[in-house]
């Protein structure tokens, strides 16, 4: 049975899982992909137009490596029962998503919700918003869709975490927040050294500041809102709408400002970061 609430520890340290695929200049420490630059294809090419759209943000979902991608669904989409060869994580960017056992009652998850789908577990995925977009992440690949009669038990348990059940911590709770009212919630992983993990970060409208990173792998996805981005390696400011991506390796500073509505970002890292407000 899936759970609707979870108590998860904040992730600040971990191991390096896969190399970053940065720009051709080997001296570059960072990369940025705006939502407008995304190249779309099919999540399951064999199903053609019946398949959800998909686009890699980092990594390559067709290879044996970690990867992060966008997946979009039409309103009313409902998959047949199926399994995956690998475990994945999903964060809802837009719309309403349901992911559960084929006979489970629908629980529509809005923007900012999170779920995990263990390898081998029979399930369906459905969408009910006018526009439906998620960020999907794997730690190894390739990402395959397989028949439900090939289901198997891999020992992992699924999670459905509705956005309304998130527990947010602010600067009074956490040392990694410096200055203005940012909030953080942990999604997966552990706070033990040597383990990778993922968090959501909520930034208020008008926020300006810096994400100071010290990590072999750091990846940020804009889940909600509009963010203006710059760094020492960007010639011009970049406008990052929901579905945009930025990442870095080593010690690096990402400078961001938030428009007139709150923003939510997803961070995957194996190191440490600090949110430092300019005010």
Image: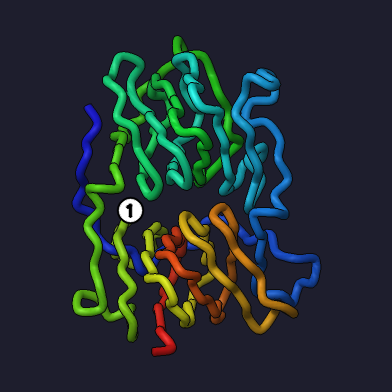
Total marks shown come to: 1
Residue position for label 1 = 187
* Image coords of residue 35 (percent x, y): 64, 54
- Say if 159 sits above or below 239 in the image: above
Circle 1 — which element?
Answer: strand
**Within 10 angstroms of label 1, few (less than 14), some, or many (20 or more) residues?**
many
* Image coords of residue 210 (percent x, y): 48, 81
Left or right: residue 32 versus residue 153 is: right
* Image coords of residue 199 (percent x, y): 37, 60
Is residue 49 visible in the rendered image? The answer is yes
- Say if 177 sits above or below 248 in the image: below
Q: Residue at 37% across / 71% down in the picture?
A: 204
Left or right: residue 96 versus residue 22 is: left
Depth order, front residue of 170/146: 170
Is residue 66 visible in the rendered image? The answer is no
- Outermost residue to the bottom: 279
Q: Residue at 47% across / 44% down in the picture?
A: 94
């Amino acid at each position: 049975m899936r759970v609707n609430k979870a108590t998860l520890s904040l992730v600040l340290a971990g191991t390096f899982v896969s190399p970053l695929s940065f720009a051709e200049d080997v001296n570059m420490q960072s990369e940025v992909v705006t939502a407008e630059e995304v190249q779309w294809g099919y999540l399951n090419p064999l199903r053609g137009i019946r398949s959800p759209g998909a686009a890699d943000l980092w990594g390559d979902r067709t290879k044996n490596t970690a990867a992060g991608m966008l997946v979009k669904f039409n309103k009313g989409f409902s998959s047949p029962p199926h399994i995956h060869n690998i475990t994945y994580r999903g964060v809802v960017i837009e719309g309403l998503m349901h992911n559960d056992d084929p006979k489970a009652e629908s629980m529509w998850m809005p923007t900012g919700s999170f779920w995990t789908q263990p390898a081998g577990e029979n399930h369906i995925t459905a969408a009910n918003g006018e526009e439906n977009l998620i960020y999907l992440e794997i730690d190894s690949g390739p990402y395959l869709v397989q028949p439900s009669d090939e289901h198997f038990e891999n020992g992992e348990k699924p999670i459905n975490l509705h956005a309304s059940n998130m527990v947010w911590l602010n600067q009074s709770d956490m040392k990694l927040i410096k200055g203005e009212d940012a909030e953080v919630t942990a999604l997966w992983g552990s706070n033990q050294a040597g383990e990778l993990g993922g968090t959501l970060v909520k930034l208020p409208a008008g926020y300006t500041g810096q994400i100071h990173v010290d990590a072999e792998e750091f990846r940020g996805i804009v889940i909600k809102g509009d963010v203006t981005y710059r760094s020492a390696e960007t010639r011009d400011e970049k406008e990052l709408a929901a579905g945009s991506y930025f990442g870095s390796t080593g010690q690096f500073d990402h400078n961001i400002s938030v428009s007139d509505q709150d923003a939510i970002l997803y961070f995957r890292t194996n190191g440490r970061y600090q949110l430092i407000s300019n005010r």
